[in-house]
Amino acid sequence: MIDAEDVRRTALSFPETVEKEAWRMPTFRVAGKMYLTIPDDQTSFAVRCPRHERRELIAAEPEKFWVPPHEASSAWVRVRLAALEDPAELWDILVDSWRQAAPDRLAEQHPELRPGAAAG
């Protein structure tokens, strides 16, 4: 089963990622932009997700994706760790969020970091 430490380890493997505590929880940033948080209960994590895609994700897999009421107006989605199928799925979700936050120059320097690519 995938746990919060797997999330942390995967996120920190991406270029220029730094971990910083905010709101009493670990957050992960690239070029100063946050792309991942791990809430206190460590049963889920939150990633960047455009709202139109978020609706589709939640409709397709409500057991995996959801948005707490206080984050409804944001462009983030929560992911339940217990619902993830394997480390490759975790990698795809995190790399997608990383690419949304990373500067274009950095994303272009790392074409291997794309959803669907083999996780390192």
Image (cartoon, rainbow, N blue to C red):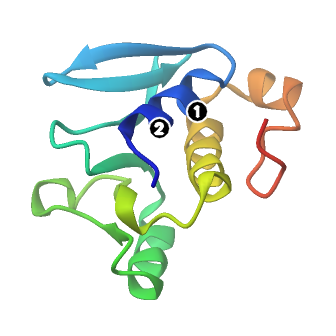
Q: Are marks 1 and 2 in contact (CB under 8 Å)?
A: yes
Q: In the rendered structure, find residue 1 and report the number of the disc placed on it.
A: none
Q: Which one is nearer the viewer's eye here, 52 or 69? A: 69
- Residue 118 on image: x %, y %: 83, 48
- The residue at the point 42 percent across, 32 percent down is 5
Q: Is residue 116 above or below residue 14?
A: below
Q: Is residue 110 left or right of residue 98?
A: right
| Residue type, label 2 | Val
Residue 111 seen in this snapshot: yes
At label 1, counting other C-alpha atoms closer than 10 Å, the crowd grade (few under 14, some 14-19, many 20 or more) is some
Residue 80 seen in this snapshot: no
- Residue 77 on image: x %, y %: 36, 58
- Residue 1 on image: x %, y %: 45, 55
**Where is mark 1, residue-wise?**
10
Considering the numbered disc 2 on the image, is that residue within a helix, a strand or a loop?
helix
Residue 15 picture quarter: top right
Residue 59 picture quarter: bottom left
Q: Is residue 45 left or right of residue 2?
A: left
Q: Is residue 114 left or right of residue 55?
A: right
Q: Is residue 69 above or below residue 93?
A: below
Q: Quadrant of the C terminus?
A: top right
- The residue at the point 47 percent across, 56 percent down is 49
Numbered-mark total: 2
Q: CA distance from mark 1 to mark 2?
A: 5 Å
- The residue at the point 13 percent across, 22 percent down is 24
**Where is mark 2, residue-wise?**
7
